[in-house]
């Protein structure tokens, strides 16, 4: 009888073991420089190197120099602050973040970029804990960060940046882009009552104080816009006699002048001329 019970228990244990999800192997970061984090699965997926050279980003020389200095310090283990790139839409904040990373990483083999989605901010504490103590140095990029869901995401980000009782990981730098300096949604609601809304606002604004480096981006003037267009045209052999006139007409149709608009005009012109572009 005892043998029958033991055999039954053994079969049950074996069945449960087959049903249990496999233990995930620790991720490795030796196959690439850029990764995307999947909050649903916890995977870190290899992404291609960012192809746009840093030199092609014009009109943002001050911002470029400051970010290069910050990431260069971080790459060698010197004290450095988390970075918030904020300002007008289309200014090239995300492109600048990736282009600067690529520029610094070429001389820093341990540097890695991990991109996380803005709607997966609550996963950041576990992401930071995973990176703690590893030999690589991680720049964690969150593009278009804001707290549409209220204070919960803000608390998670604060927890990640502060690191709890263990303190923040020395080998992680958080880099976020946002159209808003204090990361708050434009339609910040007071449906829960003015006191609760005020508390949420304080929680969200306090997160922006955790960024020691605020790098702002203002509107692009016409001269900078045309400089960007000419830079792209020269780089990709797209020079035409009426280049500036067409570029200004394009910007008027879009109702804006920005690095994004200059690049979109360049893509359209390349398609018309039968040229190829890296992005």
Image: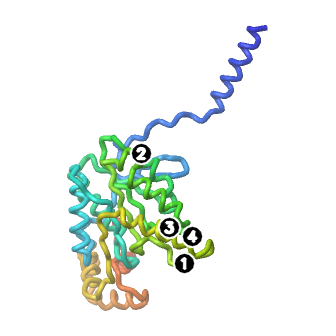
Q: Residue at x 46, y 47 (%)?
A: 126
Q: Which mark is residue 196?
A: 4
Q: Between 201 and 97, which is closer to the camera in this rendering?
A: 201
Query: Mark 1 packing: few (<14 Cα in 10 Å), some, or many (20+)?
Result: few
Q: Considering only order in the chain, which callout, 4 or 2, is on the residue closer to the N terminus?
A: 2
Distance Cα–Cα, label 2 vs label 1: 33 Å
Vertical order, 18 against 151 (above or below): above
Q: Which mark is residue 53?
A: none
The residue tagged with tag 2: helix, strand or loop? helix
- In front: label 3 or label 4: 4
Distance Cα–Cα, label 3 vs label 2: 22 Å
Quadrant including the C terminus = bottom left
Q: Which mark is residue 147?
A: 3
The residue tagged with tag 4: helix, strand or loop? helix
Q: Quadrant of residue 144?
A: bottom left
Report the residue marked by disc 1.
187
- In front: label 4 or label 1: 4
Query: Mark 2 packing: few (<14 Cα in 10 Å), some, or many (20+)?
Result: some
Distance Cα–Cα, label 3 vs label 1: 11 Å
Q: Between 58 and 5, which is closer to the camera in this rendering?
A: 5
Report the residue marked by disc 2.
129
Q: Are marks 4 and 1 in contact (CB under 8 Å)?
A: no
Distance Cα–Cα, label 4 vs label 1: 15 Å
Q: Residue at x 30, y 65 (%)?
A: 52
Q: Considering only order in the chain, which callout, 1 or 2, is on the residue closer to the N terminus?
A: 2
Q: Residue at x 54, y 78 (%)?
A: 187
The residue tagged with tag 1: helix, strand or loop? loop
Query: Mark 4 packing: few (<14 Cα in 10 Å), some, or many (20+)?
Result: few
Q: Between 175 and 214, which is closer to the camera in this rendering?
A: 214
């Amino acid at each position: 009888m005892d043998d029958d019970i033991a055999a039954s228990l053994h079969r049950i244990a074996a069945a449960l073991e087959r049903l249990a999800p496999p233990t995930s192997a620790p991720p490795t970061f030796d196959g690439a420089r850029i990764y995307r984090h999947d909050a649903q699965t916890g995977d870190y997926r290899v992404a291609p190197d960012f192809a746009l050279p840093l030199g092609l980003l014009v009109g943002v020389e001050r911002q470029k120099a400051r970010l290069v200095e910050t990431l260069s310090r971080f790459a060698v283990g010197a004290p450095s602050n988390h970075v918030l790139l904020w300002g007008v839409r289309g200014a090239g904040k995300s492109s600048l973040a990736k282009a600067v990373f690529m520029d610094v990483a070429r001389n820093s083999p341990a540097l890695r970029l991990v991109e996380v989605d803005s709607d997966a901010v609550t996963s950041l504490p576990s992401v930071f804990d995973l990176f703690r103590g590893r030999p690589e140095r991680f720049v964690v990029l969150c593009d278009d960060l804001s707290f549409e869901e209220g204070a919960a995401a803000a608390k998670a980000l604060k927890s990640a940046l502060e690191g709890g009782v263990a303190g923040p990981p020395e080998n992680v730098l958080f880099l976020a882009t946002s159209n808003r300096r204090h990361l708050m949604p434009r339609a910040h609601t007071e449906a829960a009552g003015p006191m609760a809304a005020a508390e949420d606002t304080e929680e969200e604004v306090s997160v922006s104080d955790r960024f020691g480096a605020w790098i702002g981006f203002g509107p692009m003037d016409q001269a900078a816009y045309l400089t960007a267009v000419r830079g792209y045209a020269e780089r990709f052999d797209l020079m035409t006699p009426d280049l500036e006139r067409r570029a200004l007409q394009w910007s008027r149709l879009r109702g804006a002048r920005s690095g994004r608009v200059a690049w979109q005009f360049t893509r359209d012109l390349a398609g018309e001329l039968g040229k190829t572009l890296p992005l």
